C-alpha cells in the first residue's frame, strides 16, 4: 500500500466545550495519511487515477470550516468517516491538533487510524 499525505492543514472552526470557545473560531491542524495504490496514476500520469490531495484538502476546509464540534474526538471520527466514504480510501491515519489549547504545550489533540491497512 502506498500513502498519499497532507501535512499541517490548518482550518479555522468552532471547537471546544467552554463558552468562550463557542464564540470564537480556533485553528485546528491536521496531518492525514491515506492508503492508496499510486501505480496506475504513475504509469498513466492521469489525475483521474490518483488520490487527489487537493480535492481532499478542499473538502476538509469546507467540512471543518462550516462545522462546530465540542470535542476534537468527534471531529476526528467524522473526518475519518468522510474521507473513507467520499474518497474510497481503505485506510487512514489522522492527527488533529489544537495548537495553543494548553499554554504550556505547543499542541494537543488526537491521532486515530481507521479502515484496513493493506
Image (cartoon, helix red, strand yellow):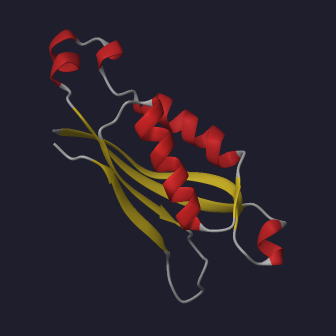
In-front residue for pair 116/53: 116
- Residue 15 spot, x, y in % from top left: 69, 64
Q: Is residue 40 left or right of residue 8?
A: left
Q: Tag count in the figure?
A: 0
Does residue 45 sit above or below 72 in this rendering? above
Residue at 23 percent of width and 18 percent of height: 41
- Residue 47 spot, x, y in % from top left: 34, 16
Quarter placement of the N terminus:
top left
Q: Quadrant of residue 85?
A: top left
Residue at 48 percent of width and 61 percent of height: 96
Quarter placement of the C terminus:
top left
Does residue 17 sit above or below 79 in this rendering? below
Q: Is residue 111 left or right of residue 117?
A: right
Residue at 50 percent of width and 40 percent of height: 82
- Residue 35 spot, x, y in % from top left: 26, 40
Residue at 20 percent of width and 27 percent of height: 38
Does residue 57 sit above or below 23 in this rendering? above
- Residue 20 spot, x, y in % from top left: 82, 75
Q: Quadrant of residue 6?
A: top left
Q: Is residue 48 left or right of residue 1?
A: right
Q: Residue furthest bottom?
A: 104
Amino acid at each position: 500500500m502506498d500513502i498519499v499525505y497532507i501535512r499541517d492543514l490548518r482550518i479555522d472552526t468552532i471547537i471546544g466545550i467552554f463558552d468562550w470557545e463557542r464564540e470564537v473560531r480556533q485553528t485546528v491542524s491536521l496531518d492525514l495519511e491515506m492508503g492508496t495504490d499510486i501505480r496506475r496514476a504513475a504509469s498513466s500520469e492521469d489525475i483521474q487515477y490518483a488520490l487527489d490531495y487537493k480535492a481532499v484538502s478542499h473538502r476538509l476546509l469546507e467540512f471543518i470550516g462550516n462545522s462546530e464540534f465540542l470535542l476534537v474526538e468527534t471531529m476526528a471520527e467524522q473526518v475519518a468517516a468522510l474521507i473513507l466514504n467520499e474518497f474510497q480510501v481503505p485506510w487512514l491515519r489522522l492527527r488533529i491538533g489544537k495548537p495553543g489549547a494548553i499554554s504550556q504545550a505547543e499542541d494537543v489533540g488526537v491521532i486515530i487510524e481507521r479502515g484496513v491497512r493493506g
